[in-house]
Image (cartoon, helix red, strand yellow):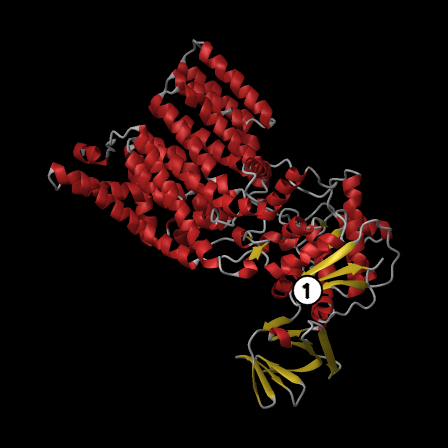
Amino acid sequence: MGDLFKFLSLEEEKLNWKIVLLLIMVAYAFNIAVRYIYISYIGDIPQFYWNGHLMINNNDGYYWAEGARDILSGIHQKNDLSPINMPASILTATLAKFFVFIPLDVLIEYLPGFLGSLVVIPVILIGRALGSTWLGFLASLLAGMAWSYYHRTMFGYYDTDMLVVVFPTFALWAIIWSIQKQDKIFLFLAPFIEILMIHWHGGLYNIATGFFIMSFIYILIFSRNKENLYLLILLLIPLLRIEFLYQIVLLVVLYLSLLKVDIKIDIKYLFIVIGVVFAVLVAMPWISNILNSGYFTRASTQADGGFKYFSVVNTVSEAIHIDKEVLIHRISGGYIGFVLGIFGYILLAIRYPIILISLPMVVLGLFALRGGLRFTIFAVPFFALGDAYIAYLFGKFSYKLFEEKKAKIVYYVVSLAIMFGFIYPNYKHIHQYIMPTVFTKDEIMVLNKLRQIASRDDYVVSWWDYGYPIRYYADVKTLIDGAKHSGDVNFPVSFALTRDLLSSRNMAVLDVYFTEYNYNHNVSSQDYLKSMMKMYGFKDPNDFLDYLSTNIKLPPLKEDIYYYLPLRMLKILPIVAEFSEIDLKTSKMNYHYFKIANNYKQIGNEIILGKKVKILLNKGAIIINKQIIPIKKFAMTSYDQNNKLHVTIKNIHKNGLNIIFMRSYNKFLIMDDFFFNSAYIQLFVLENTQGLFEKVILTPYVKVYKVKK
């Protein structure tokens, strides 16, 4: 048993800091290099460029970019939701001021890769703290480019994820180093990094709390001394719910005080005091935070007032439960890397229990099975350490098989070769993972034109997926976006996009009116529908929604309202409709028929749209799953050489489904009356305004309309 324990021990290679820095540079360069694979694939696609620069591939990124843009310009309008006080925007703007020769669009494109790859530094330093810099180096090669971590730190994926793992991994290294080396600087550095990481993303509060619990347990069992007790006291400061600057001041004051004051009290009593303080000041708020945190649940299903709205979580892929196979591949790239990563992590924990302080990040990564794929990134560095430990042990075993002159070379070659075996599935995936930009050049051209037409105080109605890019490129206001998209605020916009044009116009005006009213009167409630009903004297929401289909008297607006309708919204139109096609009293969904056929084949009088769908031209009917359904309306749209749309509509039967052949797009649309009469279909597909909307910008890819007052 003693021999096994000795074999599992890490043997420091006696590397000086110059060699350590060289290994960090190599690991960092390697992870940057693999990110350029993506650039090499998309670099020749003109539609992914704007003003000569590649665009980002993450919707949320435009939120932080908007804040950085407004910080740099020094201008933003009231109630525009621009995050000018958020760390990600401030950091980006600061870097843009320092690197004045780099355009903002270039900075936000490449920043995720260059910042995300910094994770190699704490991973290498954790290995060094445990006893082997080489172990940390091996792990860093994988930690920075494993499947899910690459996804969320690749070039173009501009988001807070670029540092959301880097910060806590640095904090973990500082904690381990402080406990192992009793270094007084790290007594300050560990809680300081935690304060920064919580300020960067509030969801990291849970990891900081987990670090405290695991540090408390480890110190209690293995390393009870005054310095480590001081560390626990200082680690409480990031968990106090006070302002960021107050935390920094408190940390500095308490740190300096602990250095000067020699507390003469029995250590066991200090543990009791620290435990009580933690339980009283942290535990209960932490539980509340987990239950209510927007990081775990980014939407509600029921607003104050009893209305049962459709939850956005049902439609966000990253928040939907994932299966075990997806979890395995996203954390380690494959089954072998995942299984050996767990095995290696367990062996490492047996030999060096201090690594168990990382358990909160590992558990959070595995929590992805329930919480969604976004959490997998937190486990990546530690599965990489587990894989690296297996590679290290094989290298160490090989070392013993050769004479001393060759043994060292064999040790490095074998361990590195095995590590590249773990890396290869992830490297192969990077070659296959091509993420398109959020918008194409043609879509951005429309927003750029809109920017020249609309005022900064005007509103644009569109789905929340497009909210941030619209604000960034058109510099206007939106009603919903990637953060403001709970069920109660999505309902009016969904209604405006999917109901008849008169109802749509009325709802859009009322939604903008009450959005501005709530902002200007500091009303915290977002239940605009309830306010609308109160204005018109309705108690039943269904009666009020029916009322909107009539010519009602609308409140005056100083702002103009535009509709931004992209072609890409066509494929998610049924999802958009779900948010307003719900009975607000019973939560019962109203489902409607909508199908897109992108391929078709005509044989005589039959147009085959799929295995179980075909149009019978001579009978004016359509067969769906062997059921013959009459065609009510048959419309055909096509563009001429001047991009002018021509529409023909033929009425066939009084009842049935409607068919639209979008000839220029090679698409057939099959739908019931609900979707045929919807604002999106009428405005984008048929360009029918019914005198309620003004045509502003019309292209085959995006159409912009203005609500007539």
**Callout 1: 10 Å neighbours few (<14), some, many (20+)?**
few
Q: Name the quarter where the N terminus is drawn.
A: top left
Image spot of residue 222 (x, y percent) = 33, 24
The reply, left or right, for residue 286 in relation to residue 140 is right
Question: What amino acid type is highlighted by mark number 1?
Answer: Asn
Position of residue 299 relative to residue 246, above or below, is: below
Q: Quadrant of residue 613?
A: bottom right
Residue at image location 44% in from the left, 37% down from the top = 360
In the rendered image, the residue lying farthest to the front is: 101
Q: Is residue 211 above or below residue 102?
A: above
Q: Nearer the viewer, residue 430 or 619?
A: 430
Which quarter of the rendered picture does the C terminus lie within? bottom right
Q: Is residue 681 left or right of residue 160?
A: right
Q: Position of residue 82 (x, y in %)?
A: 67, 42
Tell me what residue is drawn at x 64 percent, y 38 percent: 72
503 relative position to 286: left or right: right
Q: Position of residue 105 (x, y in %)?
A: 57, 47
Residue on which disc 1 sits: 590
Res. 461 in view: no
In percent of width and height, residue 150 lies at 44, 49
Q: Secondary structure at mark 1?
A: loop
Residue at the image position 64 percent from the left and 49 percent from the top: 468
